[in-house]
Image: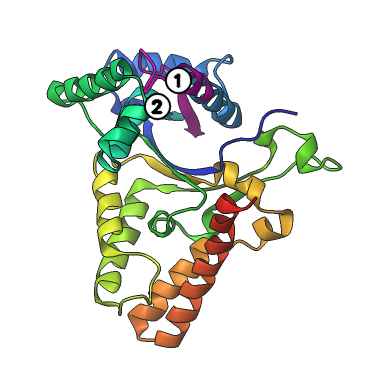
Amino acid sequence: MRGVLPYAAYLRVYEPVTAFPEPERTVWTAYAESRRRPRRAGALEAEQREALARLVERRAAPERESRDAYVRREGDLYYVAPWGTRLRCWLAYERFRDGTTAALAAAALPPIAAESAGTGLERRRRSGRSMDPHILSCTWHVPAEWLVPFRGEERCRELPPDGEGAAEVSTAARAMLYVTPLTEARRRIAEALPVVAIADEGVLPVGTADLMTLDRWLTGFHPGSLVELDYGGLVHLLDEHALETDMSVVELAVALTASRRGEHELAVAAGERLRARWRRVRALESAN
């Protein structure tokens, strides 16, 4: 049995390898075709091992940017979502630093590590390179705005082999994913925005600012990209029945459609089902 993955969900953008300039295009093509690269689930575990090593060493970020990526293939075309571990760590540290007291931030990392993270992030900004990682993560729940780009029929579940329980197989054996073209994701967000903007406060479980932030993030990538929602380690907080009956994407779509049509009671009911589902999951964070 392998270790349990962190209780986090992931939103990834996979860009076609043809969208990368050379020499990155050649590098990522060779990587995608390699039999030695970690597959999706193995990549989650590899990322977790690296994160634990940094925690022990009290480092904010790896010394070099990751050369790994998540890979999808559609027909003859490869799509990659580079891990971007260094950038993601820098951004996470910046959010932590800006959202806490100076004393707590200083206690979290040695001064040299904190200075290195700040310097590296500023150097990246000055370089003109994109500050948008291909991967977003969120612990203990799936943010409501992440559900908007998808539809129920785009769900893909992976289950343990017959006769094996979740505790007897790799963490990779259970997964729940949604995948859609980036153009569809942005179209659905565009349709949702005016509905959310005029809805009465508290009716819908998603906010205008969060949706606009998500859309701005997506605009930084090639329009031929794919967007993937991965429940990641959250699947291990849900039993088989809970996974089978998880209709979060559908519930939010129903709430949005009902609100658009003026069906207030249906919008409230669908939104509350979604809130209640994730309240139960988030409550586990503080459980003994």
> In screen coordinates, is 114 left or right of 150?
left
Amino acid under label 2? Answer: Pro
Q: What is the x, y in percent for residue 199? A: 30, 77
Please name the residue shown 40% across and 42% down the image. 226
Q: Is residue 106 magenta?
A: no
State how many labels appear: 2
Q: Earlier in the sequence, mark 1 or mark 2?
A: 1
Quadrant including the N terminus: top right
Is 215 drawn above or below residue 148 in the view shown?
Answer: above
The answer to which image quadrant residue 26 occupies is top left
Per the image, the residue denoted by label 1 is: 68
Q: Nearer the viewer, residue 143 or 74?
A: 143
Whole-percent x and y of residue 167?
77, 39
The image shows residue 255 at horizontal and vertical percentages of 43, 74
Residues in magenta? 52-75
Rendered location of residue 164, percent (x, y) = 83, 40
Residue 189 visible, this orientation: yes
Asked whether residue 133 is in view, the answer is: no
The residue lying at 13 percent from left, 23 percent from top is 126
* Label 2: element kind: strand
Neighbours of disc 1 within 10 Å: few (<14), some (14-19), many (20+): some
